[in-house]
Amino acid sequence: MDIIKLKKANCKNCYKCIRNCPVKCIEMKNGRANILETECTMCGICVHACPQNAISVCKEIDTIKEFIQNGEEIYVSLAPSFTSSFEMEDPLQMVTALNKLGFAHVQDTAVGVSLVAKAYKEHYEKMKEKEPHPKNYMITSSCSSVNRLIRIHYPEMVPYLAPYLSPMLAHGKYLKEKYGKDIKVVMIGPCIAKKEEAQEDPNGYIDAVLTYEELGSWLLIEGITLKELPPTEMIPFDYDNNIRIYSMPGGILKSVFQEIPEENRNMIVANGPKEVADVLEYLKKTETTEPLFVEMRSCDGGCINGPAVYRSRKNRNKFINKELLLKYADTEQKDPMIKGQRDEIAAQIDVRQTFQDIAVRNPMPTEEEINEILMKTGKNSPKDMLNCGSCGYNTCREKAIAVYQGRAELRMCLPYMREKAESLSSVILYSSPDAIVAADYDLVIHEFNQSAERLFGFERTEAIGKEVYEIMDDIYFKQALETGKNITEAPYILDDGETITKQSVIQLKEHNLIVALITDVTNEIHQKEKLQKLKAQTVDTAQKVIDKQMIVAQQIASLLGETTAETKVILTRLKKLSEEGDEIL
């Protein structure tokens, strides 16, 4: 499927996507989010919720351009909500723009709405004729996202989904029946879920889905300005113009039940994930013998407020969007030849469809397993259940179940992790071998650790609240404040005249604190002094030894000189005697 994509490198572990996801279909693995496509309803809320733009929607512009390059004949099914997403003088300027992009023919998706509305009305009439039934209601199947929501997360409600194609698929089927199965049909609208619906449709009624956001970008790249174009008529079709308002809340009901007297209507309209979920929970527990027609849309404000509207209109008031759509609905088709004519193809289109349960049955933990997970994050009793929602889940219990199912991590509990970090920081701070004294900018002590207690002879409870000068000389604190610079390893002797320290004073401006790290170097200094003395003694001893060695060497040399002279005299005499002896012989 791969429709909603997440760039893991951009994910910053903020859990905002989980917080906003109505069905919590996002898992966290190693601190990074991952969208569970088999559980996703394609509502698109996470796309806009992500502050890092890590979530995006697959684009099909290249696919469509390939259709155009291959000479395919492309028909566009254009959702009427386009009028609230683009700046135009005349809605039909959009048709001209689409023709310039390479789309051969354009028709309003209202054609598909008219086919489905007819089936809905007939179904409702049959519901009234049947024997009273405790679950006598029908849920519209026009919203692809709602269809997925029910099929995945409310499988028990699948039998009550209207067994008909969505307007998009109905229109695609009609176009291919009328103009040939070889044509390409491209749906253009504000919905992300339509991409999934088109991909999963086994009949291939829709070949590609283009969102308003994609279309707007394409027009911008091509330099096409809608306001500068002349209008062009769409492919005409004989439908009531009120059909076009199906994109707004209550629009389907109005399209279907224009002729039903008010007193015979038993209907519910729900828009947005909260309302839809509330109605589904209500229907699960409610029985009614009267036919109940339920219109549902995933988007708050209906299709005119879809997740993939063009960015130039994203922040516009939804009531203005509604007004623009109503204005378009009042626009009559200009071709009078089609009015009153029967379209035989449309009359024969079968829009029936069967929906299947595709729910994912995740394993559920026992109460004992839930409590065990909760205790791992310090939640040992009900009072520990903050239910703060910082992890993205509504309750601590809900998050514990997600941990059991492997879709959440223990460390996602921010209060617990903060408490753990603060506890660890406190342990490190208090047990540090260096004395730590933290004071505010008025030099009032806020922190005084165990080493500081030993060094200065004050208990922590005594020191906190005192001014620095009452405990120690505050010269370096004041110097850091005045200069705005940190001080590193400055020497300082305590008042006892014996204890030697080195002080580093650091400003924590974001906390308005000055922190002094004080190291007792008395023993180190004394050891250095002893070492220096030992070195001096060693050098002196070595010098004396060298001097003695020099004297001995000189004495040895003198003795060697005397014996050498004596040896020379003796050898000379021996030589002379030897020579004289030869003469005598």
Image (spheres, rainbow, N blue to C red):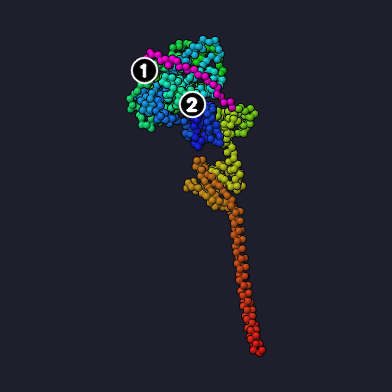
Q: For the residue carrying disc 1, how many other residues have a C-alpha within 10 Å: few (<14), some (14-19), or many (20+)?
A: few
Compared across the picture, whether 320 is left or right of 153 comes to left
Numbered circle sitting on residue 441: none
Answer yes or no: is residue 147 visible. Answer: yes
Compared across the picture, whether 164 is left or right of 233 comes to right
Q: Quadrant of residue 346?
A: top left
Q: Looking at the image, which is closer to me, 311 or 39?
A: 39
Q: Quadrant of the C terminus?
A: bottom right
Q: Quadrant of residue 93?
A: top left
Q: Quadrant of residue 450?
A: top right
Residue 522 on image: x %, y %: 59, 53
How many numbered discs? 2
Under mark 2, the amino acid is: Gln
Q: Main secondary structure of the magenta part?
A: loop
Query: Does 349 lie within the magenta span?
Result: yes
**For the view shown, which residue lies furthest in the bottom direction?**
584
Which residue range is magenta in the image?
A: 337-362
Numbered circle sitting on residue 199: 2
Mark-to-mark CA distance, 1 and 2: 34 Å
Callout 1: helix, strand or loop?
Answer: loop
Callout 1 touching callout 2 (CB < 8 Å) = no
Question: Eyeballing the image, is 347 above or below 60?
Answer: above
Q: Looking at the image, which is closer to me, 367 or 580?
A: 580
Please give the name of the residue rendered at 51% of the width and 12% of the height, measured from the top-left corner: 127
Answer yes or no: is residue 49 visible. Answer: no
Under mark 1, the amino acid is: Glu
* Residue named by callout 1: 332
Q: Looking at the image, which is closer to me, 426 or 316?
A: 316
Name the front one of labels 1 and 2: 2
Q: Looking at the image, which is closer to me, 61 or 380?
A: 61
Residue 125 on image: x %, y %: 49, 11
